[in-house]
Amino acid sequence: MSYVTIPYKKIQIRAQGNAPPKIIHAPILKISLFYKNYERFDFDCVVDSGADFCVFPANLGELAGLDVFGGKDVATYGIGGKEILYFHDVKVEAIIKDEPWIFECHAGFSTKLNTKGIGFLGRDGFFDLFQEIAFNQKTKMFRLKEF
Amino acid sequence: MKSRLKQPRAMSVNQLIKPYPGRWVALSQDDTYVVSVASSPKAVLNQARKKGEARPHLVKVPDGSWVAIAF
């Protein structure tokens, strides 16, 4: 049984109104979507234990070659309010400590994420790959425990 | 006396993307330099491909209402 420990990445929050700029840290991995023979690109995803499933920006799904809006549409309710996600079975490559981890998952594609450029790696699909995922806010590291 | 030359420090992703608020940036696969900048992910990817970047890292730079991811 082995562990992979990964440092959080810095997130810079710009000054907004009276709020000063600040730096926070979050568990983020770089991923790529596979589809047919489309050429690949990477984008960032937050490892999110609060997400039921993986969610990616719709525009990046289309860029990867998917007919995003041809997927099954499902209404979801989260902290951003109600949203329609379009679901597809996709193959994903996550870069973990410079090593590729390839997995398949039933992922939702969100138009709300189009302007953010980041996705979320949720429990169904990503967390299933590991026996345990632990977050240590004090050391700003997260640990993936393999089966 | 031995001369000591300072090595240039690599820029962080945050530093690389900072000049492009609200834009899409394609970084090199190793996140060491900016390959292209555009207003949409499709345009930035196309430009990066034309410049020979096989697998760019696409980043949407915040325009003030969102956050920037640094490395």
Image (cartoon, coloured by chain):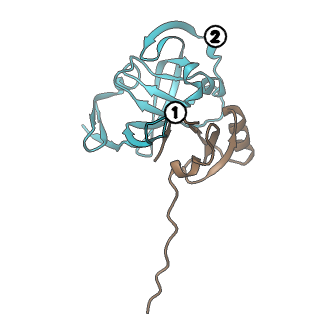
Chain colours: A cyan, B brown
Q: Residue furthest front?
A: A18
Q: Position of residue B43 (x, y in %)?
A: 72, 35
Share a chain, discs 1 and 2? no
Answer few, some or many: residues within 10 Å of disc 1's Cα (few below 14, many 20 plus, some between 14 and 19). Answer: some
Disc 2 target residue = A70
Answer yes or no: is residue A109 visible.
Answer: yes
**Residue B66 numbered mark, or none:** 1
Q: Residue furthest bottom?
A: B1
Q: Chain of mark 2?
A: A
Give whichever of A97, B45 is nearer the camera.
Answer: B45
| Spatial separation of the CA atoms under disc 1 and disc 2 | 29 Å
Answer few, some or many: residues within 10 Å of disc 2's Cα (few below 14, many 20 plus, some between 14 and 19). Answer: few
Secondary structure, mark 1, is loop
**Residue A17 numbered mark, or none:** none
Give whichever of A120, A1 is nearer the camera.
Answer: A120
- Residue A37 sits in quarter: top right
Residue at 51% of width from left, 7% of height from top? A74
Residue at 66% of width from left, 30% of height from top? A38
Amino acid type of the residue that numbered disc 2 sits on in the rendered structure: Gly
